[in-house]
Image: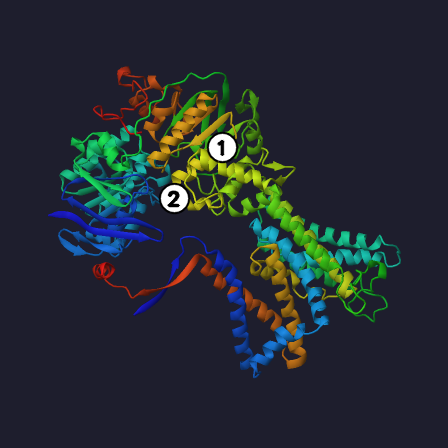
């Protein structure tokens, strides 16, 4: 006798906006379990392997940090854009360009010695990402080109630049014709936190960026203007905020942060240029921003979860002989369930008696 | 037998009761007024009759039989026609095409026949319409005719009009009333929703008054004074009359010199040779039917749109090419027509919405927001302007229209503007808030601020303006002291006849209380 329907809430539910990521994770785990059992695996053991086993030792945690750093850097930049409702999908391209630009300088400075080398390399990497972001800003503000389309296209262009570089001019002459550059010098390599692990100081770059962006958004007029622009363009114009400048700012900032992530990756855990410098961090960062509720702290936690999916995929490949593409599958499920659960922020599920005549329902109300 | 009868209609929305045990009877051929302030539940009741909204409780009888209207199409089948406040016409289609869209297929099959019928019907009711014209080329009054003719073509037995006169010039109102009287003589019932009491007294046989979702009284408007009607609408605790002295003003603050402007938007109004002056310490009112260039003119004053430098001046400084924030530094305050989605960000808190335009004062320093000062500022607005809200963290969209408007006006006034531009300051605002807002505008004027008010509410303009003019089709009439402009002359100005002379100087309102079109009106409520 009951129909389940959706009813609009009088105002958005704050509780639900925090619970929604939790629901999404639970639903992803359930679906993942079903998937594993369909593949003939014990679902509990498989989920353990995917989500818990990678973190059972210190090495696992440091590896998590290695992945959290680039994810957080990209995501915190994207958050700025998304706050302004600039749908920048281009962190991937900006990441790659950052790696490529910084890597190129590192290769030019192979023989240079001194503490100044690393900052120069990092700066050039961030600058490359920034310039890549500037292209999108120019196309958007000058020609009104949709940033979703231009950033996706620029991602492919960036990837092909990288491939051209490592197959061509940047290829290591002593590298047996592998599509890789030479290894960077020690002066152009990010210092590791400990000799035993790969975790390097880029994690501090990420945490520092989180703090800066958090302060920017909550304490400064610039952050306020970005938020107003995203919420309500007409109000931003009415208040006299400069739309074009704000668009330039968020795209440049995101480009620089993603570029820094890219150059930190190549000068950190990779140590050279190769075609695989990004396992899709720029795309995964989009999921991170939404899962982290567009909040800097949320983004740190969401980065950890997404980083775990990369490690889980590798673990499943090693221990269960399942393909590594499980990583993408779990990331996709997360986003899918998150978007579905977000419906409950503005709507609630109600059980209603099946439609009946008006007269009879008034009787029951009076009873 | 009654054409329609509502018994005990109740409709609840989450958090509020829109209609509670409402009773309404409309006889055959009767013109029945439904009176009430904004938010009293008039629109909900109309939507229930038209089948857009389902009531939670209650019975509706149509010609004596109990029915439940399944939707607008069903309502039209029964013979219920409705003219909404906001028209649902396609601007890029012709009159005939627009009407064909809403008719059953059989009736719209032959365009030629339909055009003939449109001409017949519209001429019979004195509302001439050319079926071949495109809707965007019609005036608002003519667009309303399209909506009404659309209903009349369908053998309508009950015509519902939602605040039909709010968009018309006084002369157009007269024409509409003639049509409605003719319709009623032919046996069509009319439900006339309004809050303009003089019009109700001039037109309607009976009135039902709604207050806070409940019926607060019935009356025969012709035998009731305007003041009594107003009492029924607003209750006993709100003061009704306001009487403001007219002021002369001092130095000119805002002047616009020979401003012509064509927007990129093909449907926007082109401004032609506009010149005006607003002095410090006076209120200039601009009357006019919506869509005649008000929005374009205001955008050019606020800086959201820019023009040649030497067309707009603030205290003799040319500002035509300056951006909004630079004009604000020079003393501009602006209250736009759209409260949510321009004047305030719907999803942001009152605190943030206070900062929205006040960011140039001491609320920020070197780009850093001083949160405690912003909080104090928002709190100050809420207290000084009597804003009813849950607190400074309440979202702007959670406030009623009147309270949000008080907040926005307060935000602008507390920045001590030298020029305050208000677009439709009390549109959709309850009477109590409207009185407070007008009072604040007068107070600001007396403190020496130049105030420019654009409104469609003529009574309001007569009440607060020191000088008055009208805008029509992008041209501005000459501005004259309010007491020298009769309602007739203003009506002519609004229709574009700027050379209309004051034929009857005695008919000008002698004091600030407008007499409007019914000469026997006793003390208006505005």
- What percent of the width, then of the height, locates residue A186? 85, 61
Category of crowding for the residue at label 1, using alpha-carbon neighbours closer than 10 angstroms: few (below 14), some (14–19), many (at least 20): many
Residue B179 is tagged as none
Q: Residue at x 63, y 74 (%)?
A: A52
Q: Would you identify the image quadrant in which residue B322 lies?
A: top right
- What percent of the width, then of the height, locates residue A363? 21, 60
Residue B412 is tagged as 1
Q: Would you identify the image quadrant in which residue A331 lies?
A: bottom right
**Chain letter for mark 2:** B
Specify whether residue B139 is in view. Answer: no
Q: Which residue is outermost to the left?
A: B1
Quick check: B146 left or right of A163? left
* CA distance separating discs 2 and 1: 38 Å
- What percent of the width, then of the height, locates residue A275? 73, 66
Q: Which residue is outermost to the bottom?
A: A40
Tags 2 and 1 in contact by the CB under 8 Å rule?
Answer: no
Query: What kind of element bears circle 2?
Result: loop
**Chain letter for mark 1:** B
What residue did someone put label 2 on? B92
Foreground disc of the pair 2, 1: 1
Quick check: B354 left or right of B87? right
In the rendered image, the quadrant that contains the C terminus of chain B is top left
In the foreground, B87 or B26: B26
N-term mark: 2 or 1: 2
Specify whether residue A266 is in view. Answer: yes
As displayed, is residue B516 above or below residue A104?
above
As displayed, is residue B520 above or below residue B385?
above
- What percent of the width, then of the height, locates residue B30? 15, 40
């Amino acid at each position: 006798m009951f129909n389940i329907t959706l009813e609009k809430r009088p105002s958005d539910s704050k509780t639900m906006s925090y619970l929604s990521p939790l629901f999404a994770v639970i639903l992803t785990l359930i679906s993942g379990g079903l998937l594993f059992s369909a593949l003939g695996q014990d679902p509990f053991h498989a989920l353990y392997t995917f989500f818990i086993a990678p973190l059972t030792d210190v090495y696992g945690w440091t590896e998590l940090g290695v992945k959290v750093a680039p994810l957080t850097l990209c995501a915190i930049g994207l958050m700025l854009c998304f706050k302004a409702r600039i749908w920048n999908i281009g962190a991937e391209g900006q990441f790659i360009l950052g790696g490529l630009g910084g890597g190129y300088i590192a290769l030019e400075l192979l023989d240079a010695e001194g503490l100044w080398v690393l900052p120069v390399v990092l700066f050039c990497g961030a600058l490359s990402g920034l310039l890549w972001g500037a292209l999108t800003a120019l196309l958007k503000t000058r020609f009104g080109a949709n940033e979703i389309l231009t950033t996706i296209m620029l991602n492919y262009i960036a990837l092909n630049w990288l491939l051209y570089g490592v197959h061509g001019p940047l290829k290591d002459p002593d590298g047996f014709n592998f599509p890789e550059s030479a290894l960077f010098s020690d002066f152009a390599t990010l210092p590791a936190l400990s000799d035993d692990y790969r975790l390097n100081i880029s994690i501090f770059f990420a945490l520092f960026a989180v703090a800066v962006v958090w302060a920017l958004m909550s304490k400064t007029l610039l952050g306020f203007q970005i938020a107003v622009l995203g919420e309500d363009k007409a109000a931003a114009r009415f208040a006299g905020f400069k739309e074009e400048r704000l668009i330039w700012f968020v795209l440049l900032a995101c480009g620089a942060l993603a570029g820094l992530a890219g150059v930190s990756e190549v000068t950190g855990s990779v140590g050279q240029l190769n075609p695989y410098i990004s396992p899709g961090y720029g795309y995964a960062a989009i999921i991170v921003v939404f899962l982290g509720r567009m909040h800097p702290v949320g983004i740190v936690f969401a980065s950890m979860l997404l980083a775990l999916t990369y490690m889980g995929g590798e673990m499943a490949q090693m221990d269960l002989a399942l393909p590594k593409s499980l990583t993408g599958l779990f990331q996709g499920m997360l986003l899918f369930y998150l978007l579905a659960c977000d419906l409950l922020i503005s709507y609630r599920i109600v059980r209603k008696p099946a439609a009946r005549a008006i007269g009879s329902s008034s009787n029951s109300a009076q009873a | 037998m009654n054409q329609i009868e509502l018994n005990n209609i109740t409709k609840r929305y989450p958090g509020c009761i829109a209609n509670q045990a409402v009773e309404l009877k409309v006889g055959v051929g009767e013109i029945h007024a439904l009176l009430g302030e904004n938010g009293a539940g008039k629109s909900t009741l109309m939507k229930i009759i038209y089948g857009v909204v389902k009531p939670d409780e209650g019975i509706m009888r149509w010609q004596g039989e109990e029915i439940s209207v399944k939707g607008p199409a069903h309502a039209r089948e029964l013979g219920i026609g409705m003219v909404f406040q906001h028209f649902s016409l396609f601007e890029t289609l012709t009159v005939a095409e627009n009407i064909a869209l809403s008719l059953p297929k059989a009736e719209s099959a032959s365009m030629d026949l339909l055009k003939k019928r449109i001409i017949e019907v519209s001429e019979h009711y004195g509302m001439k319409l050319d079926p071949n014209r495109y809707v965007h080329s019609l005036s608002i009054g003519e667009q309303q005719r399209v909506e009404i003719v659309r209903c009349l073509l369908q053998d309508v037995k009950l015509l519902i009009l939602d605040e039909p006169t709010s968009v018309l010039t006084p002369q157009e109102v007269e024409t509409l009333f003639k049509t409605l009287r003719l319709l009623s003589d032919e046996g069509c019932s009319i439900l006339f929703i309004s809050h303009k009491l003089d019009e109700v007294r001039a037109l309607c046989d009976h009135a039902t008054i709604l207050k806070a979702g409940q019926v607060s009284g019935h009356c025969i408007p012709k035998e009731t004074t305007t003041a009594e009607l107003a009492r029924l609408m607003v209750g006993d605790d709100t003061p009704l009359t306001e009487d403001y002295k007219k002021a002369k003003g001092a130095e000119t603050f805002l002047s616009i010199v020979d401003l012509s402007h064509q927007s990129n938007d093909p449907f926007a109004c082109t401004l032609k040779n506009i010149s005006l002056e607003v002095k410090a310490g006076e209120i200039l009112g601009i009357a006019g039917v919506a869509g005649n260039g008000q929005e374009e003119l205001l955008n050019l004053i606020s800086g959201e749109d820019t023009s040649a430098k030497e067309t707009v001046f603030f205290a003799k400084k040319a500002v035509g090419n300056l951006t909004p924030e630079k004009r604000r530094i020079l003393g501009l305050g602006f209250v736009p027509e759209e409260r949510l989605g321009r004047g305030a960000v719907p999803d942001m808190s009152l605190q943030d919405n206070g900062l929205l335009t006040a960011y140039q004062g001491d609320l920020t320093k070197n780009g850093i927001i001083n949160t405690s000062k912003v909080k104090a500022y928002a709190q100050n607005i809420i207290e000084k302007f009597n804003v009813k809200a849950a607190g400074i963290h309440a979202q702007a969209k959670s406030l009623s229209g009147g309270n949000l408007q008080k907040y926005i006006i307060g935000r602008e006034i507390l920045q001590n503007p030298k020029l305050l531009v208000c677009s439709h300051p009390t549109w959709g605002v309850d009477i109590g808030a409207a009185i407070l807002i007008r009072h604040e505008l007068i107070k600001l004027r007396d403190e020496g601020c130049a105030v420019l008010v654009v409104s469609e509410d003529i009574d309001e303009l007569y009440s607060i303006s020191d000088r008055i003019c009208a805008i029509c089709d992008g041209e501005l009439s000459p501005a004259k002291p309010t007491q020298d402009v009769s309602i007739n002359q203003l009506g002519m100005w609004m229709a574009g006849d700027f050379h209309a002379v004051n034929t009857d100087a005695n008919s000008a309102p002698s004091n600030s209380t407008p007499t409007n079109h019914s000469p026997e009106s006793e003390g208006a409520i505005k």
